[in-house]
Amino acid sequence: MELKTLQFTVTNTTSGHKIGTLQIARPEALNALNKNVLQDLKLLLHDLETKRELRALVITGSGEKAFVAGADIKEMEGMSPALAREMAHSGQALFQRIEDLPFPVVAAINGFALGGGLELALACDFMFASTTAKWGLPEVTLGLIPGYGGTQRLARLLGRALAKRIALSGEIFNAQQGYEWGLFAHVCEPAQLMALAMKQAEILADRAPLALSWVKEAINHGGDKTMSEGLKLEAELFARTFETKDRLEGVQSFIAKRRPNFQGH
Ligand code: DAK
């Protein structure tokens, strides 16, 4: 698989699990999401979904200035409404596949995360940010609205009032504001960001993989249901853990006072 706009590497943790690092690699355009990046993301996702060997993934941007400075504005100039609709549907489907990956995905925000860049981060499970992070949904300053799921995910994550404050103003916010609003799980110095995100990924990689995938499913899909439907989904997934070998391994390792070794079945 040849990726022109992404750097993807797999490393083994000290426990022998595989974690991936994905860097959006168009530093000359502050990693803006053009057609090539979206195409490469599609290829990579297909590979990740079919191989299913990763236990966690960290997504970041190349260079020191940006995570992703948005969808590529230069590609939008002559776009027809029909093409824009098609792009929105295919981009949304792509980001949904990121959200639905069966392992945790951490976004490491190393600078600008604007528009489509923030939307990409919102499809991840949570975000670590460096003090240099600058984030927001400036689409309205261009006469656009977010088209890759931003209005929906941000409102679900922070509530409607904050989502409107952010998406209607088009303002650019700093890392501290993101932390105070609960968007960023952690803020650190730029030099520490990748090491901390990788350490977090390593911790996640030691957890029971099926349990992680079902926590994601319960939170991501339960949140769109009524409380009673959400609880039903949780009970169903909880019961499913009792069909797994990892559930036995977890309980037995606790009783034997040793570290569990989860295999993902
Ligand atoms: N697209 C294309 N190129 C970009 C870019 C972007 N979003 N952001 C930066 N670049 C390019 C710049 O044009 C410049 O290229 P050259 O001029 O050197 O060729 C290079 O990256 C370096 O940027 P600057 O020289 O501007 O760097 P500064 O440090 O001075 O400024 C900045 C950094 C982030 C403040 C500035 O670059 C900026 O304002 N960038 C645009 C940020 C922005 O508005 N992002 C949101 C874009 S709207 C859709 C779905 C979703 C969306 C749209 C459509 N459909 C389904 C159709 C989402 C829309 C968005 O994301």
Image (cartoon, rainbow, N blue to C red):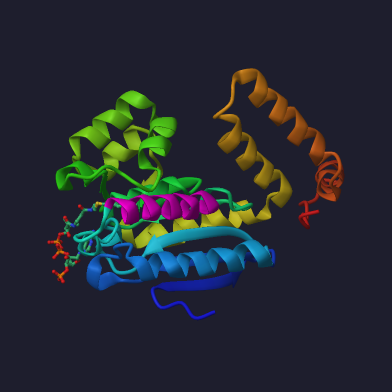
Q: Residue at x 47, y 45 (%)?
A: 126
Q: Camera-side residue: 128 or 233?
A: 233
Q: Residue at x 41, y 36 (%)?
A: 152
| Quadrant (top left, top right, bottom left, bottom right) of the N terminus | bottom right
Image quadrant, ligand 1? bottom left
Q: Quadrant of residue 49?
A: bottom right
Q: Position of residue 88 (x, y in %)?
A: 38, 50
Q: Is residue 212 part of the magenta span, yes or no?
A: no
Q: Position of residue 56 (x, y in %)?
A: 59, 57
Q: Residue at x 76, y 55 (%)?
A: 264
Whether 162 is drawn above or below 48: the answer is above
Q: Camera-side residue: 13 or 74?
A: 74
Q: Camera-side residue: 25 or 205?
A: 25
Q: Position of residue 18 (x, y in %)?
A: 63, 66
Relative side of 64 to 52, left or right: left
Relative side of 150 to 41, left or right: left
Q: Residue furthest bottom?
A: 2
Q: Position of residue 207 (x, y in %)?
A: 68, 50
Q: Residue at x 33, y 56 (%)?
A: 83
Give the dominant element type of the magenta stretch: helix, strand or loop: helix
Residue 52 visible in the picture: yes
Relative side of 102 to 200, left or right: right
Report the number of numbered marks.
0
Q: Which residues are magenta?
A: 81-98
Q: Camera-side residue: 226 or 112?
A: 226
Residue 130 visible in the picture: no
Q: Residue furthest top?
A: 228
Q: Quadrant of residue 150?
A: top left
